[in-house]
Image: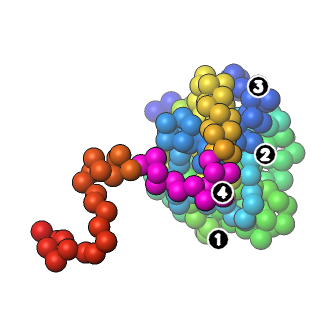
Amino acid sequence: MRHYVVRNFPRAESSLIDRLGACGVATVHEAQGRYGLMKPYMRPIYPGAKMAGSAVTVLCHEGDNIMIHAAIETLKPGDVLVVTTKADCTDGMFGDLLAASTRAHGGLGLIIDAGIRDVYDLTEMKFPVWAKAVSAAGTVKESPGSVNVPIVAAGQVVRAGDIVLADDDGVCIVKRENAEEVAKLAEARIKKEAVSREELMAGKLGVEKFRGKLAELGVKYVDELPGDWMS
């Protein structure tokens, strides 16, 4: 296998990334056809963490973080490190020192399908991280990997320059070339939900729009449970 550090790749406009970030993970995930959501074990290290940026992808050997160091050199302001390993790993591959370096080079935060360490320090820094695990197990710097190649992290394909959205609901990936369309769909969904929220607060039942579907599924409304209801 050949190993590369790709220095240059296209990124979406920051204004478009901001629009998607304002919509949030849950809305964007639904707007793009329930696609792009990473596995739910990817959790933020502190409540209220939120970010939206361009992916800088990192493929590491498990228990080895040398390629994260290499990736930081390619960061531009507004980028997010997205890290995965060649095999399952929960070792603490990223801590406060790497966070300080990431921030110094414009990186917003970290998505890592592996473990991290120094959670207290990262939280004090308000450095947003979504990770699979927390572990004090250290790493070495001996094995090659690649930077800014397509990877699979927590069940999602991520390419350099794809848009990464992360908040308390999880992590969602939007393909860069689909970002404008997804942003429009997400914003339209927010407007629609605002109307629905007002209606529900006024007492309208959400089930009204599903009565036909319930009848189609064979669900019956009765005043008393029939004795043969299990048959």
Q: Residue at x 27, y 47 (%)?
A: 216
The residue depicted at 56 percent of the width and 42 percent of the height is 29
Residue wearing tag 1 = 136
Q: CA distance from mark 2 to mark 4?
A: 41 Å
Which segment did they paint magenta? 196-210
Tell me if label 3 and label 4 are in contact, CB under 8 Å. no
Mark 3 Cα within 10 Å, few/some/many (few <14, many 20+)? few
- In the displayed structure, 228 sits above or below 34; it is below
Q: Is residue 203 magenta?
A: yes
Front in this rendered view, residue 139 or 164: 164
The residue that mark 4 highlights is 202
| Residue at point 61%, 55% (across, down) | 200
Which is more foreground, mark 1 or mark 3?
Answer: 3
Disc 3 to disc 2, how far (Cα)?
16 Å
* Residue 190's disc number: none
Amino acid type, mark 2: Leu
